[in-house]
Image: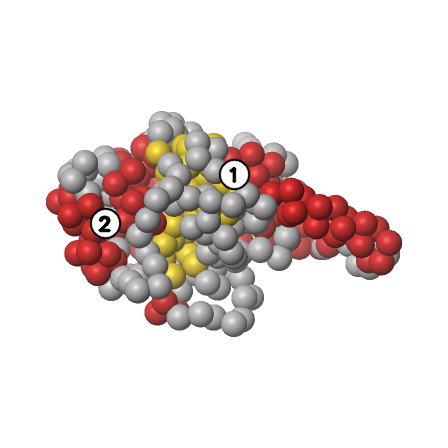
Amino acid sequence: MGCYNTTGFVSGLNVRCSDPIVAIPCVIENDGKYNPNNYYTTSQLRPISLPLFGKYDDYGSIEDIEDTPSARAWKMSVCDDIEGCMNIFERSNEYRTALSKILLHEKEYLYEHNYEEIRNGLLSALDADANICLIIEHRKVYEKLIADKNDKAKKFFNDWVSFRQKLISKKCGYFRCYFEGQPFKPMSLLALEFSENDELTKEVELLSEESDKLDKKWGRYSLNNFFFAWQSGFYAYEKDGKNDGKSIFNIDGIADAFSDFSTFDRNIMKLNVGYRTASCNCGSQNDFNNNIIKFYGFLSDFYKEDLQDEYDEDDDERDDWNEEDFNEDEE
């Protein structure tokens, strides 16, 4: 198949060769089957990593990948050849979506890449039978949707990353965490508290005190509050810190990357959009952007004339930020 445009999964706009984009590698939920009930942003697809930034390569994937915290996290957790990995995700199609089948089928086409490095890296992060795909959006669309920074998310992820850095220094900061669990009460710390290593006692006491303080500060909040009802995700990082002690949490800017992606996730939910494959026109060289913009103009007029008096979601109490819940903090 030759070169072709793709479609932004949020905007519906065509993406053309060399357009600046954001790419998100995902696993397909429900054993690769269609789910008619889109309750959450992750009902169809679940991101396995933070977004990657670069240019559309005209073949359904990403190239000229920027050196961002998310790119460095992928290299640290999976393998150095990000473009080669994304090519594997892009090759998901109606005939095969399982990682192992795509790897086998695409081996001869990855001659410009280190196949074994890509294969080993992806299989260290995902099950062989995981169903995968790649979704793409214009970079400016992503930037627009994170423009209004969520102060609550920023504070949470700054605390979360800082605390995990300290856990990692004591070899108990593995990424694996439960989205519904207490983010500042990891089992690895509890295990360390009950160890009989006297040399660690004082340091563990200090960590435990900070754990208690942060747990009190954030109370009922967990990752599920910032990636609403995900339950799980970010599988690319699950072995973080286990082998050589290197950790994504020591990457400069990683807290902001998580915070921005949380804001993006929250805002696409408000647009009634989830992580999904492009609706139509993938594989085409046609550009229907003018038609799409005209239709969006109709939607704007329709809203103003017929719907504007309805309940405004911006008044939703779920967006309220109660500072009283966090008065313990900044002592």
User: Regarding mark 2 in the picture, which secondary structure is present there?
Assistant: helix
* Location of mark 2 (residue): 122
User: Which residue is at a point 53% across and 71% down the rendered structure image?
Assistant: 37
Q: Is residue 222 left or right of residue 194?
A: right
Nearest the viewer among 10 and 257 is 10
One can see residue 99 in this view? yes
Q: Which amino acid does label 2 sit on?
A: Leu
* Location of mark 1 (residue): 138
Nearest the viewer among 325 and 123 is 123
Q: Which amino acid does label 1 sit on?
A: His
User: Which residue is at a point 44% across and 70% down the rendered structure image?
Assistant: 34
Q: In this view, does 319 lie above or below 259?
A: below
Q: In this view, does 317 lie to the left or right of 87?
A: right
Classed neighbour count for the residue bearing mark 2: other residues with Cα under 10 Å, few (<14), some (14–19), many (≥20) = many
Classed neighbour count for the residue bearing mark 1: other residues with Cα under 10 Å, few (<14), some (14–19), many (≥20) = many
User: Which residue is at a point 59% across and 46% down the rendered structure image?
Assistant: 288
The residues tagged by marks 2 and 1 sit, at their Cα atoms, a distance apart of 25 Å
User: Regarding mark 1 in the picture, which secondary structure is present there?
Assistant: strand
Nearest the viewer among 16 and 196 is 16
